[in-house]
């Protein structure tokens, strides 16, 4: 029987992803990334607090939409915006608003990547195909680990999850839960932004990798992987028994 010839990929599948890439490039080209710096945040911190106090619920919605938009465009600076959220709304509410915005923006990227890249990853070879199958069987566990320990860029995880065809509810739930610990750490840094500005020093973003912070997060990631390890152990012992 002759091998099946892969069907050509329809160009319109890449339109949503292309729009996001183009919008992100335009954002950077017009200098929008210049406002995502500690210097800009320190200079406008009082104005931001006054704006949030006057806007009320509208300010909260605007912040969530702004955060979601930046994540959807995959623009660097999410950590700084998380610090700003902690400064404007406090560590708890700041964390909640950031998590909502980040999950919404990441879901936009995920859907665009799934529309354009789903099914193409299998053409990369058998190893990638096995990776795809493993991600589909234990997608929630893998995603939680990738969100808890930000080894890979946030935008890259969004693209890969969409490319392997992860189920939407798994992606949304795993992203929402997985980013809470790191978000709270950065939002707590933002809560003390006034002191940092007075001392003339930027926030220590490397705090995430201090043992007192990193080890508990690493423990959560290990717990997320336990079901996967157990399943593989059961499968191996089952084969040996047979």
Image (cartoon, helix red, strand yellow):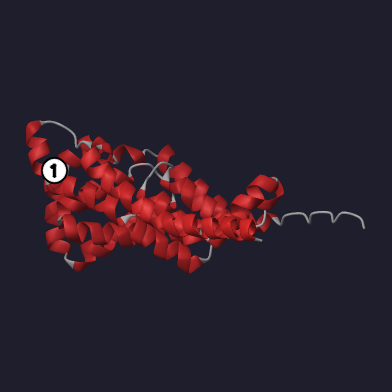
Asked if 209 appears above or below 165 in the picture, the reply is above
Residue 98 placement, left or right of 147: left
Dot 1: what SS?
A: helix
- The part of the image, by quadrant, that contains residue 9 is bottom right
What residue does disc 1 label? Answer: 193
Residue 30 placement, left or right of 95: right
Whether residue 113 is visible? no
- The part of the image, by quadrant, that contains residue 12 is bottom right
Residue 130: horizontal and vertical position, in percent? 64, 51
Q: Residue placed at 40% from the left, 57% from the top?
A: 224
> Is the N terminus in the top left, top right, bottom left or bottom right quadrant?
bottom right
143 or 66, which lies in front?
143
Q: Farthest residue in the top direction?
A: 200
Q: Residue placed at 14% from the left, 56% from the top?
A: 90
Q: Residue placed at 23% from the left, 53% from the top?
A: 184
93 or 146, which lies in front?
146
């Amino acid at each position: 029987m002759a091998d099946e010839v892969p069907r050509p990929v329809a160009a319109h599948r890449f339109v949503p992803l292309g729009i996001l890439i183009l919008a992100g490039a335009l954002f950077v080209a017009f200098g929008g990334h210049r406002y995502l710096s500690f210097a800009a945040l320190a200079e406008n911190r009082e104005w931001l607090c006054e704006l949030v106090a006057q806007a009320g619920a509208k300010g909260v919605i605007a912040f969530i939409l702004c955060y979601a938009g930046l994540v959807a465009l995959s623009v660097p600076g999410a950590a700084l915006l998380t610090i700003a959220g902690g400064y404007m709304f406090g560590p708890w509410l700041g964390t909640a608003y950031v998590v909502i915005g980040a999950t919404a923006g990441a879901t936009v990227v995920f859907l665009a990547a799934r529309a354009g890249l789903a099914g193409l990853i299998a053409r990369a070879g058998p190893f990638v195909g096995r990776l795809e199958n493993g991600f589909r069987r234990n997608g929630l566990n893998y995603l939680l680990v990738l969100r808890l320990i930000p080894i890979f860029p946030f935008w890259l995880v969004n693209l890969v999850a969409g490319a392997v065809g992860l189920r939407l509810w798994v992606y949304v739930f795993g992203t929402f839960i997985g980013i809470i610990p790191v978000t709270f750490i950065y939002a707590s840094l933002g809560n003390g932004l006034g002191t940092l500005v007075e001392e003339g020093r930027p926030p220590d973003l490397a705090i995430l990798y201090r043992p007192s912070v990193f080890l508990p997060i690493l423990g959560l990631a290990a717990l997320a992987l336990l079901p996967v390890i157990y399943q593989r152990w059961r499968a191996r012992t089952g084969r040996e028994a047979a």
